[in-house]
Amino acid sequence: MSDIQVTFRGVRGSHAMPGESTIRYGGNTTCLEVRAGGKLLVIDAGTGIISLGKELIKEHFASQKPMEVVLLLTHMHHDHNEGLPFFQPMYIASSRIYMFGPDPLEENISTVLFHSPYFPVELEELPSLKFLHSLMLSDMLYFENNEPRLIHSIHSPHPSTDDEVIVRIHRGKAHPKEGVFMYRVEYKGKSVAFCTDTEGYVGGDTGLIRFVDGVDLLIHDAQYSTDNYINDPVPKQGFGHSTPQMAMEVARRAGVGRLILTHHDPDASDDVLDSVETEVAVEYPGCQLAREGMQIHL
Ligand SMILES: [Zn+2]
Ligand SMILES: [Zn+2]
């Protein structure tokens, strides 16, 4: 049995892209399911979270066990949270939903995602128990009696052991305009880091390289080809996304075990992504592109 199980629920960047050209990689926007030590962590709530919610509801009705979800938001761009109003566990009274994300999180969620006229249901109308926590620069998350707790990782170092799930949090600055949070989940000596919506620097983003140092699995943004990045009628420099080469540079310098590229451009068809995957596998053996439904066990 694996210690950490990762399932890609949505791998598309910018906006959902259903249709014939995206059937194999998937058209839903960002959502990653991570299971470790009996905990369910969900990173981002793009449209990919909707089907996860429906599966959890089915399990809940079959088992009668309350649902507990730790939701970690990277930032508030729509493609990372537009599925949240349709995440059905929020509508069940016995659910406990712990949410972490950019400050001020409660305002970010309650004034846009759950607010008329954008959506007919207000956050406080939802019967589930919700715990919202804004993240600061150097927070770390651990579990105390099964409840997630935040501590300041520099000023209050937590004597973690391999036997507990912890989530390290890094604030990346290379995404307009408020930056982005990145998450590194560790359990029993295994680790996975999720680093989306970030653009590379010359020589690699040193803060990010330190953050993902030695992870078993790095999931990294690679929305644009170098050609899109430099030459398109609208060059994508400064849009806050990486090329596969930028992602590979981070992975090489950090000595990661395995690299998966995600946040695919909505205009990239399955055939285009197949050819990207063939190219990157030559430059970085084992590197793959994320697909909806893909599961990785660590
Ligand atoms: Zn995005
Ligand atoms: Zn973004």
Image (cartoon, rainbow, N blue to C red):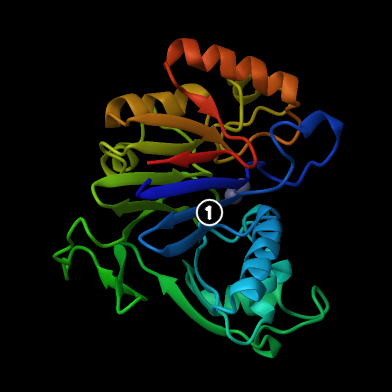
Please state the total of marks drawn on the protein image: 1
Q: In the rendering, at what x and y percent does residue 107 appear?
A: 58, 79
Q: Is residue 122 left or right of residue 120?
A: left
* Kind of residue at badge 1: Glu
Residue sitting nearer the eye, 20 or 100: 20
Q: In the rendering, at what x and y percent does residue 256 appear?
A: 32, 31
Residue farthest right in this picture: 20
Residue farthest top in this picture: 282
Q: In the rendering, at what x and y percent does residue 179 appear?
A: 48, 53
Vertical comparison of 155 with 15: above or below: below
Provide the secondary structure element on which disc 1 rests.
strand
Disc 1 marks which residue?
A: 33
Res 87 → quadrant: bottom right
* Image quadrant occupied by the C terminus: top left
Q: Is residue 244 left or right of residue 264?
A: left
- Identify the residue at image location x=54%, y=54%: 177
Bin the neighbour count of mark 1 within 10 Å (Cα to Cα): few under 14, some 14-19, many 20 and up: many
- Identify the residue at image location x=77%, y=33%: 22
Residue sitting nearer the eye, 213 or 165: 165
Q: In the rendering, at what x and y percent does residue 133 appear?
A: 44, 76
> Is the CB atom of the residue marked by disc 1 within 8 angstroms of ligand 1's nearest atom?
no
Res 215 → quadrant: top left
Residue sitting nearer the eye, 295 or 132: 295
- Identify the residue at image location x=83%, y=78%: 117
Vertical comparison of 133 with 179: above or below: below
